[in-house]
Image (spheres, grey):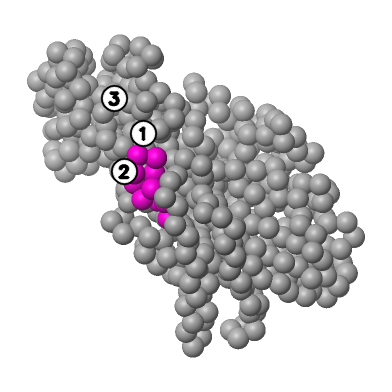
Amino acid sequence: MRYFILFALLFISFSSIAQDPWKLKATNLDSKNYYGVTVANGMIGIVSSPEPFKVKDVVLAGAYDLYGRGRVSNFLRSFNLLNMRLEIDTISIGSNEASNLVQELDMKKAAFTTSFNYIDKATVTYTYYSLRQLPYTVLMDITIKAKKDIIIGGASVMEAPDALKDVQNYYNEIDRPHVVISLLTSSAKSPTGKLTMCASNTFLFSEPHGKEPRVIHEMWDNNMHLMKFNRKIKAGETYTFSIAGSSITSAHHDDPLNEAERLTIYAKLEGRERLLLFHQKAWDELWKSDIQIEGDAQAQQDIHSMMYHLYSFVREGTALSPSPMGLSGLGYNGHVFWDTELWMYPSLLVLHPELAKSMIEYRFQRLEAAKRNAFSKGFKGAMFPWESAATGVEETPVWALSGPFEHHITGCVAIATWNYYCVTQDKVWLKEKAGRYFLLPQISGLAELREMVLDIMISKM
């Protein structure tokens, strides 16, 4: 039920004022009652803010460390690599300067757009994407339509979350005959030092090579630096630029610092049009599996919202699995519960088995930890933890008694595994993977379930 409560909160905080089946729109934002909307690609999640050009959270799937609540592993906030500042005629644009501010989530395109006016001088629109085709890369598009002659100052700001330590900031310009790449890069250690977290971004300008604005780097303090540019825009002119960035950790790559810059350079060389083209193609493929409702516009919008978030929080080939809050923030510490197999998994299994396979693979890769957990509780076989994170050991805080006593999660994992075969009829997978579960002598006390599933398997072979 937690997952459905999340959607209810999203609708309350990010109020729907239209019945468009694909779009959620909000006006008159209340910053005190604002949860935020997520664009995510199954690996990196970007959570919106009510303040112009700000991002509330950047969350990477699989990036955990021991800190904060409960003496257990928690999701880490990544570098805020899409925060930016915009000045118009030397005035920095914030909430007080923006009028008629509207935010809209386009679920079909997986795009989050904010638009506003700045007095009588300009209309500003920006959209950000967690690029579906590039797991660690995000893009922000900024468009400024001048109503009068103006000078804009755009700045990309890289800021480290408070929990990270040993922050290192870098700036580099790669000058090649047909392209100049300005790289704003940061790295840091996670709270225990277990992980290295890195992020890098760059500007994508609309001008041809040789006519791009000059980029200047500024170091503000150890936890923040920026790169910026200025440009004149004439009345009636529309100017567009973008920021592409990548974030990755040592949990995902052995050399995250260089890889973050490589991924950002790749995005720069791809260019804005190709990045958006392949992002949309990837989401079009996902939406080939849709649920259509006739005669109830609100129900259709609600269903699309639920599907959009499920698709956003899971990615093919990752061996990662979503928490009840997915990549929408640090809720539930980012831990994987039984909600995954019982509430989220069934619809994904039917609509996109390749996504569901990642969720099952997450459990397979932590089977040895589940065996050790069963042994410590006096059981044979495997006992999956009530709360699971990176390693598959029990991550439930000690004060929450669900850790020792909620055994039914193992049955949920077993049922999900069997259902994967029932839907896909993949006998190679059944022989090489599923047998590792069901041929165990006992599954944490659920002997009847084990015998039932074994009987079904034998009868189907």
Disc marking residue 394: 3
Residue at label 1? 66
Q: Are marks 1 and 2 in contact (CB under 8 Å)?
A: yes
Q: Comparing marks 3 and 2, which lies closer to the viewer?
A: 2
Residue 35 location in percent, x, y?
63, 34
Residue that appears at 78% across and 53% down: 116
Mark 2 lies on residue: 194
Residue at image coords 54%, 35%: 306
In the rendered view, does 399 fall on the left or right side of 171?
left
Q: Residue furthest front?
A: 221
Q: Mark 3 near mark 2, Cβ–Cβ under 8 Å? A: no
Q: Earlier in the sequence, mark 3 or mark 1?
A: 1
Gap in angstroms between the C-alphas marked 3 and 2: 19 Å
Query: From mark 1 to mark 2, how far is it between C-alphas?
Result: 9 Å
Residue 343 picture location, percent across and down: 43, 26
Look at the image and give the residue range highlighted in magenta. Answer: 187-197
Please report whichever mark, 3 or 2, sits nearer to the chain's N-terminal start.
Answer: 2
Against 400, residue 6 (above or below) is below
Badge nearest the viewer, 3 or 1: 1
Amino acid type, label 3? Glu
Determine the secondary structure under disc 2: loop
Residue 233 against residue 441 in the figure, above or below: below
Is residue 59 visible to the viewer in this orientation of the structure? no
Can I make out residue 226 in this image? yes
Disc 3 and disc 1 in contact, CB within 8 angstroms: no
Q: Is residue 306 left or right of residue 67?
A: right
Q: Amino acid at mark 2?
A: Lys
Local packing at callout 1 (Cα closer than 10 Å; few below 14, some 14-19, many 20+) is some
Q: Earlier in the sequence, mark 1 or mark 2?
A: 1
Name the residue: 65% across, 77% down: 213
Residue 194, image quadrant:
top left
